[in-house]
Image (cartoon, grey):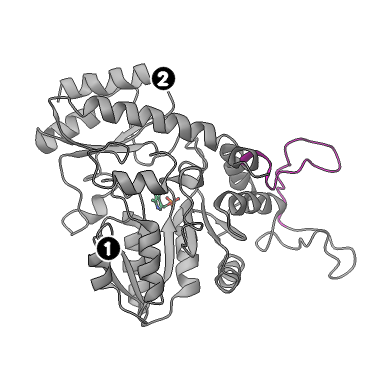
Amino acid sequence: MSDFSTRAIHAGQEFDPTTGAVVPPIYMSSTFVQDGIGGFRGGYEYARGGNPTRDSLQTLLASLEGGTHAYSFASGLAAEDALLRAILAPGDHVLMGNDVYGGTHRLVNRLHVPWGVELSTVEMSNADAVRAAIRPGVTRVLWLETPSNPLMKITDIAALVAIGHEAGAIVVVDNTFATPYLQQPLALGADVVVHSTTKYLGGHSDVIGGAVVLSDEEIAEKVAFLQFGAGAISAPMEAWLTVRGIKTLAVRMDRHSSNAHTIAATVESHPAIERVYYPGLESHPGHEIAARQMSDFGGMLSLALKGGPEAAKRVAEGTEVFQLAESLGGVESLIGYPTEMTHASVKGTELAVPENVIRLSVGIEGIDDLLGDITAALDRA
Ligand SMILES: *Cc1c(COP(=O)(O)O)cnc(C)c1O
């Protein structure tokens, strides 16, 4: 199975051998009968340690990201926390982008820093700035997120991997926005991929989850231990829903990307628009790198309004098909005002988002309805 779309449907998804059910069942069982003490069937003992439904998701995720191991968690942040606690020790330094997902920054800043880890942020799309900020032998983690949120900045993964490795750091890529369908960080040299599977992988806004994918045996063992030892596992129903979503990832991403591209290109010339942030546009400063490391540009875009914060809020509250809500990556289109929604926790800090910016998670509805909706709201901005 070499084709991505085939693996998305079949990897880890063998039919049920007892009944022939095409879709593997959801194993809602906390424990497993032993054939004599220690006689485990298929290795299953107690479901914090392992459950067949979680395994089927993990096998699928490893296949799609090209890793040897995947571990799924109760949320994206639970996955990130397990990874970071697996690899960090007091005194270690973490370097991340100054526009990293707010919850990721909060996680390290509020939970790991008090424990003795050092955190600093840098303009990650500027390789020289990263070279100046990284501390050889001290920086343990270089954390990349590309495209970033909400300004869709693009980081050159291969170039940053070289800088990170030269300094002795583990390079982690949050691949939530791009998904493995559009971008393969491990193939570009990254050590670890993390996901909020809540977003495009689940794809239907009906499940919270996260994952860590990697091929490094030593780190994998530590993450596996934290998954079992701290227990922030994904539950069977959540794992199954995520698998269910992933089967259509390829076709969804094609449609997300084409809808977003059309909207970005169309509204770029609208009189209410100051700037469109979409890596698929040639006007985007990261366009060339994105075109090199991504197979398409995805479904996320942001718009800066000439009319300032008031105009931005009017547009965010003025659409009908685009629903005003946090989160992203579902089949339905969402609109948000980052300053007071997704990025409220970083308001007033160096991570703050311009106050005239709105963010769109472009869904897979009909493009005419989406364009009509956003254009009408912009006309009223
Ligand atoms: C949502 C998100 C997270 C956090 O994931 P949860 O599932 O909400 O815990 C991390 N990174 C990115 C890029 C996200 O969009």
Q: Nearer the viewer, mark 2 or mark 1?
A: 1
Q: Residue at x 48, y 58 (%)?
A: 193
Q: Mark 2 vs mark 1: which is more N-terminal? A: 1
Question: Which residue range is magenta in the image?
Answer: 8-30
- Residue 349 coordinates in the image, percent (x, y): 18, 59
- Residue 88 coordinates in the image, percent (x, y): 44, 76
**Label 2, on which residue?**
366
The three-letter amino acid code for the residue at tag 1 is Ala
Left or right: 269 with respect to 108? left
**Label 1, on which residue?**
127
Residue 67 in magenta stretch:
no
Which secondary structure type mostly characterizes the magenta part of the structure?
loop
Depth check: 44 or 369 in front?
Answer: 369
Mark 2 neighbour density, 10 Å: few (under 14) some (14–19) many (20 or more) = few
- Does dot 2 land on a helix, a strand or a loop? loop
- Residue 188 coordinates in the image, percent (x, y): 46, 58
User: Which image quadrant: the N terminus?
Assistant: top right
Q: Quadrant of residue 26?
A: top right
Depth check: 362 or 254 in front?
Answer: 254
| 343 to 157, vertically: above or below | above
| 87 to 194, vertically: above or below | below
Which residue appears farthest toward the right when viewing the image?
A: 36
- Does dot 1 land on a helix, a strand or a loop? helix
| 149 to 302, vertically: above or below | below
User: Which image quadrant: the C terminus?
Assistant: top left
Q: Looking at the rendered structure, which numbered label has been put on residue 290?
A: none
Residue 21 in magenta stretch:
yes
Mark 1 neighbour density, 10 Å: few (under 14) some (14–19) many (20 or more) = some
The three-letter amino acid code for the residue at tag 2 is Gly
Q: Residue at x 62, y 51 (%)?
A: 63
